[in-house]
Image: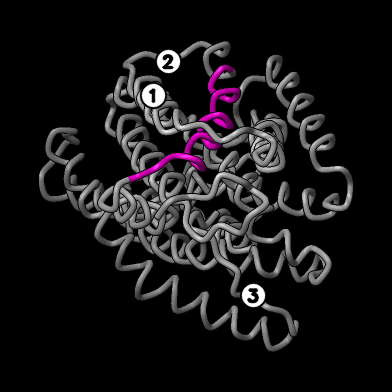
């Protein structure tokens, strides 16, 4: 389906942006595999996919909610966002926590202390960071039972800020916040996942999310051009080169990526895709969030079982196993858990709030 060029029109399918989410999610998995399996040159810069996620969210949320900005209170909006984001987070914790308990039984040093484990579970279920978490439960990660969860914390915070300021001139506000956060990042660098870099997570999410918001509101002022599809694919190639080059990009290059991301999103919103590519993009977008939320918990079990039966880690053997299992189980979790849970919770919210919660776009953020 041809995506509409103007952001002012309600768009039902952004298959190109869906596809970006799918590519980014898989790249994050490969990035973490490189770290977990001692191959740091594997997808070295794919952690920058997080910033693309934030930018996509900033572009898509105004699209999905602009017609309901006067119908929903801040509480109602956040309830909808929690229904969208939290079921898979809860599932991820439910997968990791038993693994940590079971692993502790086989550790010669006495295992995991019960209190830190209980704290990590409780805080994780409330989507709150665990500062200075002990290494026995996964510290120094702010979310020791599911490291990538820190981005969901940041996502919800920036969503609340955006919704609370939605009646202010959005172009001026979003550009101001994006630029201000970007300038802060030139000093702090990109971080947010561990206690030491916690505060840098705020300008990180602000820079990319509000760049996405600005892109949405400026989209209608950008003239239609047949070359957007070529620009889109060219930037996809640039993204893949950046993500997979086998050395860490300096901060300057990382910041350039933050500038390129909204251009990639804009080009993707206007790109023409073939029917086959559209189908693949929609599928990639649908499974991207389960992949992102579940790859850390699933890796814990797969790696633990592999090492128990086959010995030391081996990226050539374990990497493909993890990737295939994560893809399959993420799709299963989407269809048998996430979608049914969200439908049920959304129906309850609709009855209680008395508003239409059915608005959808192809990029679910």
Check disc 3: other Cα within 10 Å, few if <14, some if 14-19, many if 20+: some
Name the spot of residue 188 as percent of width and height, x first.
69, 19
- Foreground disc of the pair 2, 1: 1
Label 2, secondary structure: give it. Answer: loop
Q: Closer to the camera, 19 or 343? A: 19
Q: Is residue 182 above or below residue 336?
A: above
Which residue is denoted by mark 2 in the rendering? Answer: 248
Check disc 1: other Cα within 10 Å, few if <14, some if 14-19, many if 20+: few
Name the spot of residue 345 as percent of width and height, x first.
58, 80
The mark that comes first in sequence, 2 or 1, is: 1
Q: Closer to the camera, 134 or 226? A: 226
Label 3, secondary structure: give it. Answer: loop
- Judged left or right of residue 45, residue 180 is right
Label 1, secondary structure: give it. Answer: helix
- Foreground disc of the pair 3, 1: 1
**Which mark identifies residue 234?**
1
Identify the image quadrant of the C terminus. Answer: bottom right
How far is the residue under mark 2 from the one under mark 3? 42 Å
Name the spot of residue 300 as percent of width and height, x first.
33, 50
Which residue is denoted by mark 3 in the rendering? Answer: 357
């Amino acid at each position: 389906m041809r995506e509409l060029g103007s952001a002012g029109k309600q768009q039902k399918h952004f298959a190109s942006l869906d596809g970006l989410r799918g590519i980014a999610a898989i790249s994050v998995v490969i990035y973490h595999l490189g770290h977990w399996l001692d191959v740091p040159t594997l997808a070295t810069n794919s952690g920058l996919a997080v910033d693309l996620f934030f930018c996509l969210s900033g572009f898509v949320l105004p699209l999905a909610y602009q017609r309901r900005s006067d119908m929903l209170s801040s509480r109602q909006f956040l309830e909808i966002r929690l229904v969208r984001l939290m079921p898979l987070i809860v599932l991820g914790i439910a997968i990791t926590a038993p693994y940590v308990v079971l692993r502790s039984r086989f550790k010669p040093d006495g295992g995991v202390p019960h209190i830190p484990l209980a704290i990590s579970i409780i805080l994780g279920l409330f989507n709150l960071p665990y500062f200075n978490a002990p290494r026995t439960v996964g510290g120094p990660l702010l979310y020791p039972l599911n490291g990538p969860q820190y981005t969901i914390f940041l996502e919800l915070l920036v969503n609340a800020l955006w919704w609370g300021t939605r009646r202010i001139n959005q172009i001026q506000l979003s550009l101001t916040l994006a630029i201000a956060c970007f300038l802060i990042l030139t000093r702090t660098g990109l971080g947010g996942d561990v206690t030491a870099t916690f505060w840098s997570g705020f300008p990180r999410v602000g820079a990319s999310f509000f760049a996405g918001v600005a892109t949405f509101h400026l989209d209608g002022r950008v003239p239609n051009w047949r070359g957007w599809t070529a620009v889109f694919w060219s930037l996809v190639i640039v993204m893949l080169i950046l993500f997979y080059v086998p050395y860490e990009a300096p901060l300057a290059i990382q910041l350039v990526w933050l500038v390129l991301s909204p251009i990639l999103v804009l080009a993707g919103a206007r790109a023409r895709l073939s029917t086959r590519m559209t189908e693949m993009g929609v599928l990639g977008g649908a499974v991207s969030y389960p992949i992102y939320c579940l790859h850390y918990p699933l890796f814990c079990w797969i790696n633990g079982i592999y090492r128990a039966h086959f010995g030391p880690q081996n990226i050539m053997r374990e990497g493909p196993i993890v990737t295939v299992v994560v893809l399959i189980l993420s799709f299963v979790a989407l269809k048998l858990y996430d979608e049914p849970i969200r439908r049920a919770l959304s129906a309850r919210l609709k009855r209680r709030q008395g508003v239409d919660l059915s608005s959808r776009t192809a990029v679910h953020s």
